[in-house]
Image (cartoon, rainbow, N blue to C red):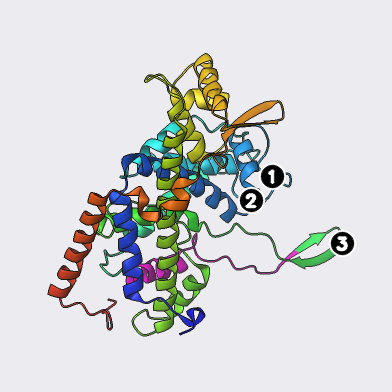
Amino acid sequence: MDPADYTPSLPDALLALGRLDGALVMAERTTQRLFATRLLRDLLIGALRQEGHAFTDERFHAWFAGATTLSDEPTRAARPPRSLCEAILTELTHSSWDLLAEAATRFQPALLAPADLVDSSPTCLTAHQDALSVIAAAHDLIAKLDSCPNPLAGLAQLHRAAAGHVLFAPTERAPEPFVIGTMRLTGEPMALPAPRWALELLWGEHWHKAGLLAHALPLPRIIRLDAMRIAAVSDFDEHDTTREIFAATLCDVAQNLYSGIGEAGLLVRRLTACQPGKRRTSRAPALLELLAAFGPLRSGQLETLLGVSRLGIRTMLGELERISVLECTSLAGLRLYGVNLKSRPAWDVAEVGMVSAFSTASLEEYESAMADIDALLARRGVSFNDVDAT
């Protein structure tokens, strides 16, 4: 069978979701913390790009540090970037996953991006209020959905609800007449993109409460516009196409997150091999972990995130420079500090697979848990060949 012709099914989706959940539960605490920090950064970047902002990862870090604007060309149809990130960080501080909540709380004061230039008319919502209202609307939409043990049916329910929502439905560009002097013209005004990022931010909490996930993982890219249009006009129980779309989507999202956990585990091994700071009281390892997980930051941000003085940060940076992993770039008179581990020994990458982030005992416990799940499904008479999606 040609791999290109393979279509994921419900069992594939369930396996991918279970694999992801088990990997995160069994991962070491340091791996989980590093993964949560990277996920936080990726959520901010993903939401900004969904809104229509165009930028590179390097530009994001410079903007986050307050060194420049997010992009050279203003995007009028997009929600203001700083207000959007502030709202997301505020929401994530309430996450039931403690490590994600802690990461968001730490990074709130480290957001030094330039203030948004927006209309301050008292008749309009501020940019921050608008972003918070989007998240509140996502909360309300999800709260009205039934708890569903079948994740694909749950995704279909979510997409149908979003497709019928005035805020989350795919935007339709309709021509509108306008007048310039004596001329009457017709054009298509730019509309705000559907803020799918808010639903993706919160859907993991819904599955956590339903018992499908041990931790409330945000699920980037779990919402698909094409699936939203199909779900609005089709019945999940009667069309295999919608099942295939949601199965493929869930497999892709779960696999990407699972790979992220594995990469975090390998990065932990690299960081351990670096061993910056000879004194037991050295905070250099914490600095190294922070820069490796989130990316380049300026000195003032590091002081806030680590709770140390400027002199302390300077000493820690010196220890990273001593082991040749520190990178420094200058932009608009500001220095951004990052790390480059490519020159470090890559024994962990070459000789250890993805599961190297987990101990033997953890893997055995994971396999036992998967066997228990199989036995539970068998007792309930669940057939993967013909699953009732209701």
Categorize mark 1 by other alpha carbons within 10 Å: few (<14), some (14-19), many (20+).
Answer: some
Q: Earlier in the sequence, mark 2 or mark 1?
A: 2
- Residue that badge 2 annotates: 53
x and y percent of residue 306 in the render?
44, 25
Q: Nearer the viewer, residue 274 or 30?
A: 274
In the image, what residue occupies the spot 33% across and 81% down? 237
> Which numbered tag is attached to residue 182?
3
x and y percent of residue 263 in the render?
45, 50
Categorize mark 2 by other alpha carbons within 10 Å: few (<14), some (14-19), many (20+).
Answer: many
| Residues in magenta, as a range | 151-177
C-alpha distance separating marks 2 and 3: 35 Å
Q: Amino acid at mark 1?
A: Ser
C-alpha distance separating marks 2 and 1: 7 Å
> Which numbered tag is attached to residue 71?
1
Residue 199 appears anywhere in the view: no
Indicate the quadrant where residue 90 lies. top left
Categorize mark 3 by other alpha carbons within 10 Å: few (<14), some (14-19), many (20+).
Answer: few
